[in-house]
Structures are given as structure tokens and as C-alpha cells.
Image: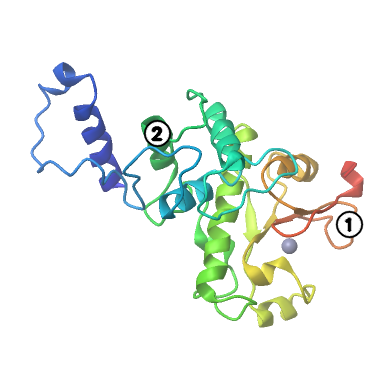
Amino acid sequence: MKTRLAGVTAALVAGAVASFVAPVAVSAPAAPAPTADGCYSWSKTLSEGASGDDVRNLQIRVAGYPGSGGSLAIDGVFGPGTKDAVVRFQQAYGLPADGVAGESTFAKIYELQDDDCSPVNFDYSELNTCNSDWSGGKLSADEAKANALVTMWKLQAMRHAMGDAAIQVNGGFRSVSCNDSVGGAPNSRHLYGDAADLGAGSQGFCALALQARDHGFGEILGPGYPGHDDHVHVAGGADTWSAPDCGL
Ligand SMILES: [Zn+2]
């Protein structure tokens, strides 16, 4: 958090408001401009045709903006789908929507992410009530945790689209033993770390289930689907949307 605030100051100094900044006494040594955030900082503008780890990190943050029924590949290649996702992200936050990730887009992402790279309104601990090290699922611990990070950014997009009301997460990743103990399906997405079970919150189950379609959740199970009258399950994976009591 402190690192991020320092980055904001650096951005102001670098901007066109030097006369405003001048009277402010800055006692700390000047930080290098590109290190703007405690989690991850982008050092250059990204647009269609770019590729690399910086693109992959961008894709994680805009994974919740693939368009209705869509899913954004986290592949480090800035193609048309990534451009469209960046445009939707920019529109969601009132930024110039040109599909180019530059200073204003990165500044908004820095504002939205904690130092552990999770979005400000969701935490790894909510996405894993099974164990502390993400082990024992169907993927490596690192892969499961990485999937949970993408899931959180999808939820952050969904939360913002629903007026920034809190979304309650009752669990996510499960090891095989955790999954067995709650009677989960043997191929449950919870074993891969990219599923989350949502409480009703102020939105209600059906609003959550219907909204999830716009944010990269290929799997949505809610009221009317067996065992899902008391929560909404959202996950990656193949398109399976079923919440009959919600018309889905
Ligand atoms: Zn579930």
C-alpha cells in the first residue's frame, strides 16, 4: 500500500501539475518512476500485437471483461480479445476506452490491487477455506492459487458491475480430501482452484447467477440446480449454466 501511494506521487511529479507539486515537501528519496505498485508494475504501454509476461499480468486483471459468455485466454498474447477486454475495463471505470493499456489504465489497476496482487475486495483466504498451502487438488499448488487469483479478478469485475455491493465468498479451492468431505463432485472445479461459492448478499442469488455470465464464468450453478439453492457456484471450465429458478 505504501509503495502504491509513493507511485501515485511519482506519477503526479511526472505529470503536468509540477507547479502544484512544487510546494509539497517530499522527504523520502525519489522512487524510480516505473515501480509504482507493491504487487506488479508495468513499464510500458501495451496494445494489440504485444506479448510477454506484462501482457499476461494485464490479462489476469481484465479477465472479468470478456463480454457475455466469453472467456479471456491468459496466454500473454495481446490479441483482439484482450483489446476488447481492456476496452470494457476502461468503460467500466470511465477511462478513455481505446483498448490500449497505458498510464490511466495501469493507475486504475494499481488502485484496485493489493500488494499480494489480489483485488482489493477479495482475498486468498476467502478463496481457500480448505488449507493454507493450496496443495492436494488436481493441479500444483501454484497453479491452483494462480487460478484463484484470476477468479478474484473476475469477481471484482462482477462486483463493480453490480454497484460495488459486497459479494460474499464462502469458499473456493478444495483439496481432494476437502472435496470428498463436503461431498463435492469428483471432477469439481473447486479441485482446480478456479471456482467460488457465493452467498446471497444484498444482490440475491439470481442476480449473482445472471450477472456472472458477463464476467468469464463458464460454469454457473444456482437456485433450482440440485444442491445449489443456498449458494451460487461460479467457475471457469466448460459452459454449464444452470439456475432454473432464475430462468438460467
Ligand atoms: Zn461450488
Image-quadrant location for residue 106: top left
Q: How is the image coloured?
A: rainbow
Percent coordinates x, y for residue 101 in the rendering: 44, 36
Q: How many marks?
A: 2
Please name the amino acid that badge 1 sits on.
Tyr
Discs 1/2, front: 2
Which residue in the structure is indicated by mark 1? 225
Image-quadrant location for residue 166: top right
Measuring 58% from the left and 47% from the top, which residue is drawn there? 63
Measuring 68% from the left and 45% from the top, which residue is drawn there? 201
Which residue in the structure is indicated by mark 2? 102
Of mark 1 and mark 2, the one earlier in the sequence is 2
Q: Is residue 126 visible?
A: no
Vertical placement of residue 141 versus 81, above or below:
below
Percent coordinates x, y for residue 222 in the rendering: 82, 52
Please name the amino acid that badge 2 sits on.
Gly
Quadrant containing ligand 1: bottom right
Marks 1/2 in contact by CB < 8 Å: the verdict is no
Q: Local crowd at mark 1 within 10 Å, few (<14), some, or many (≥20)?
A: some
What is the distance, in whole Å, between disc 1 and disc 2 at their CAs?
43 Å
